[in-house]
Image: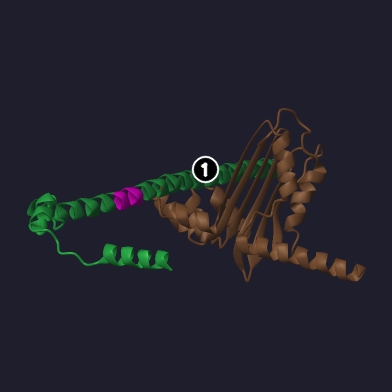
Amino acid sequence: MDEHEDLEHWLREGLRPRQTPAGFSARLMARLPETSPVPSSQTKRWVPAIRWATAVLLLGVAGGSYWQHQQQERVAGERARAQLFLALRMSAATLNDVQHKVLRSTTGDSE
Amino acid sequence: MRNLSITATFAACLFALSVGAQNGTPPFPATLEKELAARASNYTEVSMDKKMLNFAGKFLSKGDDDVEAKQIIEKLDGVYVREYDFEQPGQYTAADLERIRSQFQGSEWSSMVRERSKSGQADTDVYMKIVDGKMQGMFVLDAESKELDLVYIAGTLDPAELSKLDGNFGIPKGVAKHVAKGAGK
């Protein structure tokens, strides 16, 4: 029982509200760093610049990829155009051969 | 069960044919193409479907050849060219040619030119697909002892427009006239 009383007394004594020593607030404030979490005017000045730089960078990336896409499409288009002319020339050459053969055989028949 | 599998196979064949027709795939037998390419010493295969023709059309300039080409391809659904060069004669057989010709035996196809050599190594065929009096396609087979050329042009081919080919793309003057005359028959 005594032990319980002792513990209670010890707790009451330990948790008793105490008066802060004189000059505590002043000392605490003095120890805090001088820089405040509020951005300084110097930092504030850089925020729009950073935003613009990010926007320009994003635009650059978008423009670059668009240009690359356009380049790829142009190359593919040129290839398709070349392929078309190859197909037309080959068709023409075959038609030409056929015409010569037909003309040759017709002339041969008539002779 | 057996009937069901036959019906399914038939339906699959019909579906494949219809898909092929929609995609404008060349009517050359695909397996034969591979075989010929394997036997050839040199070969060129150019396949341009409607989509590819439209795409190429966007990149044509205002030059004479380009303008003519644009006018020609506008109504075409595809241009398919195959050229096989062989080291020696006999690298393709008469049966191979028949397999190709058999693709153009439908009622819409008419044989315009049919030339056969005794050796079977210098055959020429020109088929025209005519629907409602309009030329809807052309197929040319030109077989020589060491060379085999196949040309399939799908789409509306107006004989008058065909004459625009004259003197262009390396076509000597008069060739288109000759073909157009045949189509008008």
Residue B62: x and y in percent read 35, 51
Residue B95: x and y in percent read 82, 45
Residue A2 is one of the magenta-drawn residues: no
Count of numbered marks: 1
Point out the residue furthest to the right here.
B2
Residue B104: x and y in percent read 72, 57
Say above or below: A106 vs B144: below
What secondary structure is found at the residue carrying circle 1? Answer: helix
**Which kind of residue does numbered mark 1 sit on?**
Leu
Residue annotated with mark 1: A86
**Quadrant for the N terminus of chain B in the image:** bottom right
Protein chain holding label 1: A
Say above or below: B142 vs A23: above
Asked if residue A33 lies left or right of residue B175, the reply is left
Q: Quadrant of residue A12?
A: bottom left
Res A107 visible: yes
Asked if residue B116 lies left or right of residue A64, the reply is right
Report which colour depicts chain A. green
Magenta span: chief secondary structure: helix
Residue A66 is one of the magenta-drawn residues: yes
Q: Quadrant of residue B133?
A: bottom right
Residue interval drawn in magenta: A61-67
Res B167 visible: no
Asked if residue A95 lies left or right of residue B70, the reply is right
Point out the residue furthest to the front here.
A2
Report which colour depicts chain B. brown
Residue B93: x and y in percent read 80, 40
Point out the residue furthest to the top here.
B87
Asked if residue A16 lies left or right of residue A91, the reply is left
Crowd around label 1: few <14 · some 14–19 · many ≥20 (10 Å): some
**Quadrant for the C terminus of chain B in the image:** bottom right
